[in-house]
Image: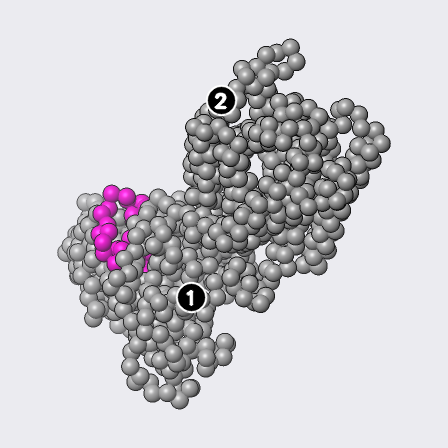
Amino acid sequence: MLARARRFFDIRSGETLPVLIAFLYIAAVIAAFLLAKAIRSGLFLKEYGPYALAYVYAAVPLALSIFVPIYTRVSTRFGQRAVAVGTLLLFAAQALLFWYLFRAHPVYVLPAVFYVWVNCFGIIASVQAWSFANSLFDTRQAKRLFGVIGAGASLGAILGGFLARVLVEPVGGPVNLLLVLTALILGAAVTVTAASLYVRRQGSTRRSSTPHPFRETLKQIADTPYLRHIAAMVFLVAIVTQWTSFQLSLVATERFKSDAAALTQFNGTFNFALGTVSFIVQLMLTATALRRFGVALTILLLPVALGFGSALILLVPIFWSVVATNALDQGLRFSVDKATYELLYLPIAPSERARVKNAIDIVLNRAGDATGGVFLGLATRGFAGLPGLELGLRGTAAINLVLLSLWCTIAWRLRREYVRTIRDIIHQHRLDAERAARSVLDRSAAQAVTVKLNAQNTADVLYGLSLIEEQRRHRWRPRLRELLQHPEPEVRRRALAMLSADGDRSIASVAEEMLRDPDAGVRTEALLFLSRELGVDPLVRIQELGDFPDFSIRASMAAFLAAPGPAQNLEAARVIISQMVGAEGPNASRERMEAARVLALAPEGLGDLLARLLRDEEPEVARLAVAAARVVRDEEITLPLIDLLARTELTEDAADVLSRRGSTVVRPLKTRLLDENAPVEVRREIPLVLMQIGTPEAGRALVDALLEGDATVRYRVIASLNKLKRLHPEVPVDRPLVELLLAAEIAGHYRSHQVLGAVRQTLSTDDPVFKAMDVSMEHERERIFRLMSLLLPESGLQDAYVGLQSTNQAIRANALEFLDNVLKPQLREVLVPVLDPQTTLDERIAIADRLVGAPVTTAQAGLAAMLADPVLREVASGALQRVGADTEAPDVHAPAPADMAIGV
């Protein structure tokens, strides 16, 4: 039975005990409050009548203003849970004291003092109870569970109403019910103690709080739009519900005169009946409403219902219309509205939540009570020496309708602020994550290179130089200049070559000295630098110094002839460079490297030679050729550059050169991207290049490639188009095509869950299949989010995706809650369950069977389905052989269902 109840109320593993504790805590507190409320109303109305309520309404905030600063300081010192137990014990002792005073010293002001005490008890104890519940669950858990936990309030209303109705006569009147009230408060204290022990067993420790001046909390509320809207709504709720309660007291007094027992019994009966209805609504409706519609709808239920009731009182000002309005108030306020209201606090940082909640729920709420009490007095019979407007039921109902319209307006805005606040939280998380990753990467990389360059071992220094060669070297120039004096000739030569490649002419004087270096390689590098960068005639220097290899003479002459100036002769340079490109022998690669460097001095007319070097198998030759391609504009080099995208060591450089050529290379890039016979390694890199080009033509080329069959190519096309759309919003997107592809991706992702569920029947969880499936399914999720971002570019979906990857449970819950509020219902219903980590694989498979159809029932069928994916084919084939199945099993991939239209 317990298992069935957990499934019905959507309570997951490990949540049963905390839900039960929070449920009982809230039930005990509300039962005590509503019993005390019935007692106080009977005693007060008998002694003073309904119009005196204006005085105590205004007095409650004054009492709280004394209590709250003390409570805040004690909570900071001892912790919320310890103070909650102490507060309940204090309230129990005070209830016993009131019993004694009513029996032994029933002075005239005692009912009024008791009335104020009951209100303070109800406010403080309920705030403590819900604060405890807030501390146990994140946003997603609260959305599922607060409906069940809130049913504790309805159960408490039933119990409190039942005790007031049944026991008032047997115990000898309302005063003796104070003994029952004392027992209920002690029961709540025992529940809190048990809750504290549970939390301690879970490993949680009480965090000491830093004292925070109350005025700073108020300033934070005033400066934060979200908190400001909550505070404004709470203020209005206090006034409206107070005036609604006054109307009930007014008609009850007229009906039952001054019979305290009858008034207590009526209030008990009312609370019992409404508690029963509220309990049923809470269990059957609240959780479902919160899961399906979220805060956006449930936050408006109570004001709309009270508006209907107030309009009824305005039209028909009788006893039963007032009872009906209060029934709507209490029935919804302790069920749907309370659970919704508590959800509003969950986006607030846990370190700030308790003090902000106390400030709003205890202080600002009671400020609303005080304001409402003053205006109520002025609207009815006034105060001592100050006449009122003598308004009755109709007049107060009319004013309530005005206040309810303001309440609805603020609630409407608050639901938008709720979503915006959650988005800000996950956006900040994304920025923090990116900043941290970038900082760690940059710092660790720089430290590694610095260590290598400062090493005593020559091999380490050379390795450090190789690391610098693969990145932008401007920041390393000072250290490279120092290495020109390194004792090892290879270090000197490579440092000079790198500075030469960067065009650093500040080392000209050092290069002149290095022409006399003992090492021939260093002398050659210095001669090449001077001829390329300064136009020095190499023949003159060679005659002066002698002892230079043949390749350095040819390279220097070619550089001299190719350089702009009066000595330029491109035809002669072509002859020399052609010989260098086709050179053979021990220095052939060095000659081709120098040929590539020289070609950078001839931006036109020698593109065919550069194209040959771009195809060179030597990585360093090809790298220098790519560097030359930055200035050479000939079309002959476009296709060789595209082919270089397949060489991982040159991909980044080739992509950078291609992107700088702009729209002129879009057509050949698109042709190669759509060519299924082209190397897949090349096709997978082209989308990033098109994104970097960033023109409308590049965007259209990406759109045309959205239906690519290769999953990795499709993923990169979607990712690149997504980034391009953010950088250039004007780039058009084929919305119907994207929606179709989104539907297919979601269906495919559910298909992957069917496959995963099938293969787990046979294979162990450490099988390579599962790791490969995890990677593949993560790519599926990213493609889904990027497609949605194309349809909703300003919605913050990228922040949500990053939030879902977080190890912080609260961040993941906020990301899911954000999706729940920004996606349209049809998309939300199919997407959120597959992203929610609290949804089991079996639950996802059940959705997939309904959505995609064609259930996958055997491991062999699941592995056969994986064969259709080139990325998974190898691991699936191996698994099929291990389980002894036919590797030619039919493909069971199901296409996206035709009727799966996605509304975004």
Residue 775 placement, left or right of 94 = left
| Element on which disc 2 rests | helix
Question: Does the magenta segment cover residue 732?
Answer: yes
The stretch in magenta equals 715-740
In depth, the one of 188 and 128 nearer the eye is 188
> For the residues carrying marks 2 and 1, which lies nearer the camera in this image?
2
Looking at marks 2 and 1 on the same chain, the residue that comes earlier in the sequence is marked by 2
The amino acid beneath tag 1 is: Arg
Residue at (34% x, 87% y) in the render: 886
Residue at (47% x, 47% y) in the render: 426
Where does label 1 land, which residue?
844
Magenta stretch: helix, strand or loop mostly? helix
Residue at (76% x, 27% y) in the render: 110
Residue 395: which numbered mark, if any?
2
Cα separation, mark 2 vs mark 1, equals 55 Å
Vertical relation: 309 (above or below) 677: above
The amino acid beneath tag 2 is: Gly
